[in-house]
Image: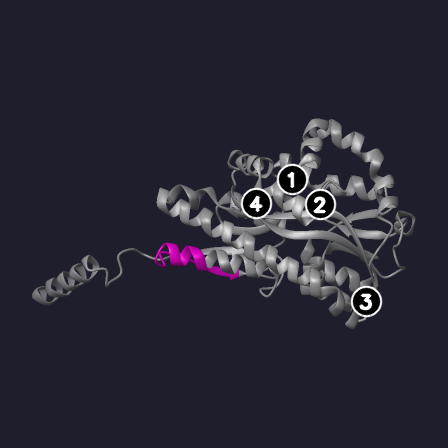
């Protein structure tokens, strides 16, 4: 028996030395996000997980928890901080409650378009924001993307800011969003994303605001009549990793993880582009009435007074630096 055991161990050692056998235990990481698996978040998370598996020879793999299976974004960020969840792909909507510096990117009408927003997030400003996260118990691997947010509701078309007045709109628990939306006359109602579909169905709120990819993947066309392409806020997203996991990674594996996150960002943004290009037609087919060119100037004029408060909180120079990126 001893000879048999010795022979087996010797064989395993030879196989490992030749690269033909298992040389390290596999670590399965839990990654969560609020939309369904077949969404921009799912696509980005899938590419990230494929890349880390490939780059670490399957020493690290992922188990996906889409569709808010691990809770809303706030709950997942807390879990990543605590180390009870390994990874989360989340928007900045809830992140500002943990890393206050990131709230600056949630200012309404701060970004001109996708090109501007992506250059900011990938450039020195966005990278500096990632560097603020470890002090808050989070590792930000790369900025992914949620997209420009638009308004939906069940009451009326929204063409001007005045049309939004009086509507009870679900928002994220984000003070910057809420301060901006109040200038439109909206009644912001913070609510966790997992509760939203039922709240819209039951009329607890009149509407909500999210990017096209989320409106599609959450099937809000089933419970909302009107969509207005207001593009009032750009919503970045980020792949967050638990510091507990990060501390265990070798330098080589850390490079694999950050490179994988960069690849995930490319894939997630491409899906956003595709949904923006094709999703409006689909939502119309689903029965939504779409205002494709609302009066953006009326919204910008309405939100202007809030910029004085934003300048006090974040610094007028920092806001101007973002606006100046070409």
CA–CA distance in space, label 1 to label 3: 33 Å
Q: Does the magenta-highlighted stretch encompass residue 57?
A: yes
CA–CA distance in space, label 4 to label 1: 10 Å
Q: Quadrant of the N terminus?
A: bottom left
Q: Secondary structure at mark 3?
A: loop
Which residue is pictured at 46% across the width and 46% down the height?
A: 258
* Residue 21, label in figure: none
Query: Residues in magenta?
Result: 50-64
Q: Quadrant of the C terminus?
A: top right
| Towards the viewer: 63 or 46 | 46
Outermost residue toward the left?
Answer: 3
Judged by depth in the image, the label closer to the viewer, 3 or 4, is 3
127 on left or right of 204: left
Identify the residue position indicated by label 1 in the image.
97
Which residue is pictured at 68% across the width and 60% down the height?
A: 213
Identify the residue position indicated by label 2 in the image.
173
295 on left or right of 317: right
Judged by depth in the image, the label closer to the viewer, 1 or 3, is 3
CA–CA distance in space, label 2 to label 1: 8 Å
Quarter of the image where one finds residue 324: top right
Identify the residue position indicated by label 3 in the image.
288
């Amino acid at each position: 028996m001893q000879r048999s055991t010795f022979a087996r161990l010797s064989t395993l050692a030879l196989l490992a030395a030749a690269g033909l056998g298992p040389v390290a235990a596999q670590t399965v990481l839990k990654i969560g996000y609020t939309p369904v698996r077949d969404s921009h978040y799912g696509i980005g998370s899938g590419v990230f997980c494929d890349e880390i598996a490939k780059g670490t020879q399957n020493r690290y793999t992922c188990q996906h928890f889409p569709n808010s299976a691990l809770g809303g974004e706030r709950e997942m960020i807390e879990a990543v901080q605590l180390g009870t969840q390994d990874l989360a792909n989340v928007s900045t909507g809830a992140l500002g409650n943990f890393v206050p510096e990131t709230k600056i990117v949630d200012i309404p009408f701060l970004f001109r378009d996708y090109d501007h927003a992506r250059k900011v997030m990938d450039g020195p400003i966005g990278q500096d924001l990632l560097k603020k996260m470890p002090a808050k118990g989070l590792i930000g691997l790369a900025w992914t993307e949620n997209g420009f947010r638009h308004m939906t509701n069940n009451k009326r078309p929204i063409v001007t800011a005045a049309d939004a007045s009086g509507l009870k709109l679900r928002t994220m628990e984000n003070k910057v969003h809420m301060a901006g939306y109040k200038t439109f006359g909206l009644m912001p109602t913070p609510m966790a994303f997992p509760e939203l579909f039922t709240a819209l169905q039951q009329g607890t709120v009149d509407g909500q605001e999210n990017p096209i990819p989320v409106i599609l993947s959450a099937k809000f066309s089933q419970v909302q009549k009107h969509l207005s392409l207001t593009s009032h806020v750009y919503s970045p997203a980020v792949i967050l990793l638990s510091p507990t996991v990060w501390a265990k990674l070798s330098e080589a594996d850390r490079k694999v993880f950050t490179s994988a996150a960069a690849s995930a960002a490319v894939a997630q943004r491409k899906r956003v582009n595709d949904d923006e290009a094709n999703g409006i037609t689909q939502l119309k087919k689903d029965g939504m009435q779409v205002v494709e060119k609302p009066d953006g100037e009326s919204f910008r004029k309405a939100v202007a007074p809030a910029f004085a408060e934003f300048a006090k909180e974040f610094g007028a120079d920092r806001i101007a630096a973002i606006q100046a990126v070409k």
